[in-house]
Image: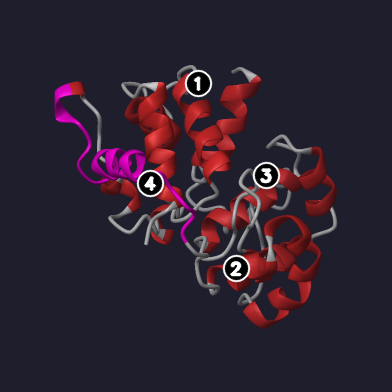
Amino acid sequence: MSRLSSRLLWLAAPVVLGTSVLAATSQKAAPKNPLALSFKTPSAVRGASLAGSCAGCHGKTGVSTKADVPSLAGQIPNYTQFQLAAFRAKLRPSNVMHQVAAKLSDQDIADLSAYYAAQAVGPAWKAEPAARARGQKLFVAGDPARNVIACAVCHGANGRGLNANHIASVTNLPPQYALAVLKEFHEAPSFGGIVPPETMRIALKPLTDRDLRDVATYISSMK
């Protein structure tokens, strides 16, 4: 599997290595799955006390003001937990996040994820009206004539995802970050049938560069 494919696997497939990233191994002799977290009931209050060091990049309460840095506010907790675990295990590339996540315990990860999930999604980013309208049509209805699947089928009409299925929220993602992720999936090789990332790859494959920009414009400006 290529480095690009590996990176996107962690972006889109938090259920690949087990039925749940929350289930710790029951066999003491077996090596610990680095993505399996063990923690007590998550505390958003404690998470708030840990989030100060994240604000410099991801913004106050997790609302990013940088077009190329993802917002964390309103993200489903299962998804944030998995991403932080993947960064800590150095399975998802990012030298900065490797250093940050290395300092986090399983409980820290759970508490941070609970805190950010409880925060209000940030304001819509400014968008060019025509591009936004085209992106909205693709997001909501797809384009059956070109075999384009509507994004709303999985992410929901409001883009907020589904925690039970580990489907990420995409509402008001910063535009440059959103476009970069969409392009990576679009250009990725096959994931060998692994359902979550393969679904993204297949769904985005028929889209043109303009389509990708339009979808990124729409999801960054959702209201």
Q: SS of the residue at dot 1? A: loop
Which quadrant of the figure contains the C terminus?
A: bottom left
Q: Which mark is residue 86?
A: 3
Q: Nearer the viewer, residue 62 or 48?
A: 62
Horizontally, residue 74 falls left or right of residue 89, namely left
Q: Which of marks 2 and 3 is in front?
A: 2
Q: Which of marks 1 and 4 is nearer the N terminus?
A: 1
Which residue is found at the position 55% from the left and 73% from the top?
Answer: 119
Q: Nearer the viewer, mark 1 or mark 4?
A: 4
Q: Which residue was labeled with disc 4? A: 218
Label 3: few (<14), some or many (≥20) within 10 Å? many
- Determine whether label 1 and label 3 are within 8 Å by CB: no
Label 1: few (<14), some or many (≥20) within 10 Å? many
Q: Earlier in the sequence, mark 1 or mark 3?
A: 3
Which contiguous range is marked in magenta?
A: 124-145
Q: In this rendering, does residue 161 appear at all?
A: yes
- Toward the bottom, the furthest residue is 45
Q: Nearer the viewer, residue 19 or 44?
A: 44
Which residue is found at the position 29% from the left and 45% from the top?
Answer: 136
- Asked which colour scheme the image uses, the reply is secondary structure
